[in-house]
Amino acid sequence: MGDTPMTEADETTYLGVTFDKRQTWKPHIVKKERKARRKLAMMRKLAGTTWGANEHILKTVYRGTVRPQLEYSSPTWSTTAKSNRQALDKIQNQALRIITGATKSTPIAFMEKITGIQPLQERRDVKILLQTEKYTCLTDHPMSARVKGYTKNRIKRSHFVHGAKKLDKAYATDLTIPTTPFGSEDIPGKQEDDQYPREAWTPVYTDGSATRAVTNGGAGIVILYPSGKRETHHAATGTHCSNYRAETEALMKAVSMIEDSTEAVFLTDAMSVLEALTNNKIPQLANALQRISTNLNVTLQWSG
């Protein structure tokens, strides 16, 4: 590019998915398998303690930490070889034995039944069908025409669309209810735009969050004035900080930022903060809102 030679790579990772140059997805499967096995070791320790974690705890740990590794972005790598998928299935089978305490001779289907844990292949099929339906509804998406059009048979390599159509045909009798695409009334923020027209109201968007809901909090604010002026702000809210506190800090900062306007609507997705404000549990924020309401018509709106 220009005078700089571009470096070639046999594989690279985007958004947690590892792409290899032949799209076999083997490197991705290997990485996820390795991570899942580390999580599986934690389950073994829990099950092997003197007090012994019960089935409910072990299932919760599996569903929350191990299984997400096994099926992350599974529609993307759905064309990988059967042997790669089976490598992930074996990890779930081991988790089932840890949960149930069953021996190696216990049938997998029996353990799935008594634990209520679906086979991974069934879950992968469902995710493929859901992704296909999304493509169908998103008419501007490049994949929309492909999932609706004719698909050539592929001898050596499979393709997402080919696999999706096979599943659609297999479950045709079960999938009888047509999907209704979202309308404009279903789009988040559309209702707020109708209720608070931009020519009169100043929308103030706030958001606050923390890593794993407990650390490194941050707040962001966007204010859109009827004049067309746009004001933004972002700031850290503390190393030890909850989502609740981060959202409160975002609202506090937004209140201090708002300039001359006739009407303003503060849009937040933190229902807990709004409930606390209603119950007089955030007096500092309530007082700040009271101060600006002497010259401004103020409304708080949940935008979740």
Image (spheres, grey):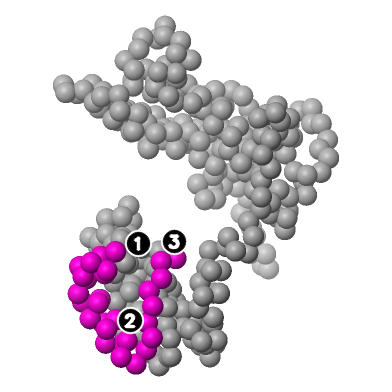
How far apart marks 1 and 2 lie (CA) works out to 18 Å
**Is 184 positioned to the left or the right of 58 in the image?**
right
* Residue type, label 1: Met
- Which labelled disc corresponds to residue 271? 1
- Which labelled disc corresponds to residue 304? 3
Q: Classify mark 1: residues with Cα within 10 Å, few (<14), some (14-19) or many (20+).
A: some
Question: What residue is rendered at 69% in x and 43% in y?
Answer: 178
Sequence order check: which comes first, mark 1 or mark 2?
Answer: 2
The residue identified by callout 2 is: 255
Quadrant assignment, res 295: bottom left
Question: What residue is rendered at 79% in x and 31% in y?
Answer: 154
Sequence order check: which comes first, mark 3 or mark 1?
Answer: 1
How far apart marks 3 and 1 lie (CA) works out to 8 Å
| CB within 8 Å, label 3 to label 1 | yes
Residue 193 included in the magenta stretch of the image: no
Disc 2, SS: helix
* Residue type, label 2: Val
Coordinates of residue 98 in the picture (x, y in percent)? 33, 20
* Residue type, label 3: Gly
Question: What residue is rendered at 41% in x and 71% in y?
Answer: 301
Disc 1, SS: helix
Residue 276 included in the magenta stretch of the image: yes
Question: Looking at this view, is 48 or 175 the one in front?
Answer: 175
Q: Which residues are magenta?
A: 275-304
Disc 3, SS: loop
Q: Is residue 229 visible?
A: yes
